[in-house]
Image (cartoon, grey):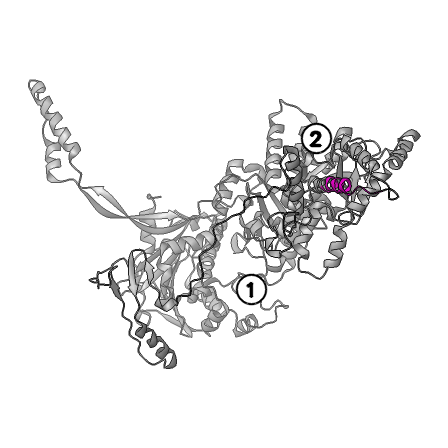
Amino acid sequence: MRVVSTLLLTVTVLTTCLFALATQDGAKKFDYQSDVARLRKIVINRDVFLRELISNANDALEKLRLTSLTDPEVLHGAEQMNITLRAYKDEDGSSRLVITDTGIGMSPEELTANLGTLAKSGTTEFLAKAESTDTTGTGNLIGAFGLGFYSSFLVSDRVYVASLAAPSSANPNPTQHVFSSSADESTFEVYPDPRGNSLGRGTEITLVLRDDALEYMDTTKIMDLVNKHSSFATSFPVYLFTQRTEEVPVEDEESEAEESTPLPSSEDEDEEEAVVEEVSEQEEEKTPKTQSITVDEWVQLNSQLPIWTRDPKTVSDEEYERFYEATFKDHEKPLAWAHFTGDSGSGVSFRAIIYIPSHLDNSYWQNPMETSAKDIRLMVKRVFITNDLGEDALPKWASWIKVVVDAEDLPLNVSRETLQSNKFLKQLKSIITRRIIQTLSKLHDAAMKDKKDGDEDDVESDVDGDKWAEISKVYNNVFKLGAVEDIKNRDKLGALVTFSTNQGKDVSLDDYLENRKKGQKQIFYLADMGKSTEDLAKSVFVEKLHARGYQVLLLSEPLDEIFVQNLKNWKRLPFQDVAKAGLKFGDEEEDPAEEKEKQKALTEQYKPLLDWLKKESKDVVRDVVISNRLVTSPCAIVADTHGYTANIEKMMNAQVAGGSNKFMHEYAKKMKLLEINPRSPLIEGLLKRVEQLPSEEEERDLEAEDELREVTSVLIDGALVRSGFGVPDSNEYVLSPLQSSDPSQRDFKRNRFFTRVDRILRRSLGVSETAPTDSTVKPAPPVDSKPVEEEELSFDDTHVRIDPEMMGLFDQQEAAPQAQAHWEVEEIDDEGNAVKPVSHDEL
């Protein structure tokens, strides 16, 4: 870099002496209508000026390169093909920014034709159309040439353009000329450069910055602008002149004398050796003197090449990863990427790279309504335009993607920051979404294929499997959201979703269908938000399905239930919530007749218990039936066909609270069934107790009924808890036999469920059910009626006394706002004596 610094510095310095327009010999003055003021009103973001000038410099270099293919003489004069930027203060104190290129250059005639015509911008009609609110026509579009040189006047009051055309057969000895113009003038001049042919070849633009544009003197600001807009705008190197301070050691006269001292002779070697050691120890302790020097350095700003312009076969994985890190400032390697070219269908061709990050930003789930993707870098001919696609932004589920899109040409507004037509944006949204799904599906299919093949020695298959496992871990919930949100791509995204089951993990819906049992016509699932899959696998609703070998999807994420409710079925197979009534295994038609007769006989046998339970649970469930889903559990609460499962009830409770649909909500909550297991010893014992109760004709045993009723209540409450529901009557006032009818003596701390459990525990331990608990507590202090204004306010160990007379000043201040209130505070000790004021600097 430093090898060319001297040459580059020479190219851009000493521009001060050429700017006395009226006194230059041979100067020609030209007229044009200046529309700079109107341009400044249209272009709000003046940062674009540097992007435009670098794009023009790139065009000049590209033209030189193409011309040199047929006329090599044009390369004479300057060996390097580059663009340089330099900011400096002139002798008169004016701030200048110089942009230089070693491109094709311009002759005096070309300076007049190109810059003069462009400065006019084609006539005032152009700006009139640009200011128009009508964006349907094509007259206000300048995507063909952009702001170009005209953007210089956004930040400068005067612009000088020195240019030396490349030598050619038509012009073997070109002369360097200067174009000079002011933003406030309606004329410009072209005259020979008094410095001679100092450029060698190319163009030098000097901007005399306005007072409100001095921020562009900051090299950090310039770096940021180039990195944002022009880091890929040119394949030619862009250099920025910088200065930094270094500390270097100072060589004094003593050290120089020591260096000139002759080496000791061999005769004195032993004697001198100790002396040399002592001197070296002293030198080690001595701190070397240093001085600060300013180092000039040219820094390349566009070292990262636009890899999307290359053939994907020629780009290595390391290059993709380095490009990702440099472009998106993410130091974690991406999980995957897709590099492709395409056509929008409206005649706009483009190249793009899609990256799948290794993590989701924390804001993705924290801002559910945020849908705009900020990591889509839309470029036109390698010049950054925008990362805001507006109404055509990607859907929420895909907003995490990181994309670089480079279009060949797009219609832009006057500042080249906003697309005038959204047709391409709508097409781009569809294209990117389709490519994301294609990339994900390809990785998923490769991983599934390798999983089925089961080749343990295949290293490549292991890599594919590990890559997809990582993607699924990060984006599994995103795929669920996409299937809910994107109806068009629902099936494709649904195929990427995986679940845990009672038989394993990472099971896709297609995997489930491949392992379904003969005759099975549903996809079984159990949802309970917040519970672990291990707990769900032990649920009462799963025990028989698991015992018979059926696979059940275990849904524990908030999106799972919503995902299933939106899909409704997968490849014509409906989803079946195993926590609801009407569970069918699919082989009921194959059951022998004796099985059906046995079920009918059990219903008849348990009819007394069913009737008893119906009466005792009428406020909780709609009906009580014999279960075909329980194996070891005595009973369970299942939702009716149109009722709420425990998981749905949790979500609906949060939504309906205080709403207008309370009646339907309460109705759906009661649509439950109590299923009992006739093979459970507990249920068999309960049946015997019910059958032992005296009939209505005989004398009733109230004590036995109360005891049985208590056992039944505990059984029902346990079924609710076991099934994931909440126990009713929680936090309800409970009046126990020991408590009086006085409301102040009611026990608010215990609900009915825990009261019943407490009594059962007392009986099992032989403790009296009526034994009271000592509830004595220390009462609160009496009410303090002391006025606040007479109170001493304590701040740590310091007491401040407020004079009541001073309080009246505040009332006067409110009555007369113009009055001057004087506030005095005297610090006193514990005995009321004044304390000497102390200055508190910390305040």
Q: Is residue 539 above or below residue 46?
A: above
Q: Is residue 43 above or below residue 362?
A: below
Q: Residue at x 54, y 47 (%)?
A: 775
Question: Dot 2 lies on which element?
Answer: loop
Q: Residue at x 60, y 38 (%)?
A: 473
| In this rendering, position of residue 808 left or right of residue 406 | left
Q: Which residue is mark 1?
A: 413
Residue type marked 2: Gln
Residue 446 % position (x, y): 66, 33
Q: Earlier in the sequence, mark 2 or mark 1?
A: 1
| The image quarter in which residue 564 lies | top right
| In this rendering, position of residue 128 left or right of residue 167 | right
Q: Which residues are magenta?
A: 699-713
Q: Which mark is residue 47?
A: none
837, 278: nearer the viewer: 837
| In this rendering, position of residue 695 left or right of residue 352 | right
736, 59: nearer the viewer: 736
Residue type marked 1: Asn
Label 1 packing within 10 angstroms: few (<14), some (14-19), many (20+): many
| In this rendering, position of residue 71 left or right of residue 213 | right
For the stretch drawn in magenta, what is the main secondary structure? helix
Residue 662 % position (x, y): 72, 58
Q: How many marks?
A: 2
Residue 82 % position (x, y): 41, 50
683, 297: nearer the viewer: 683
Q: Is residue 702 magenta?
A: yes
Q: Is residue 606 magenta?
A: no
- Whole-number angstrom distance, CA of label 2 to CA of label 1: 59 Å
Q: Which mark is residue 503?
A: 2
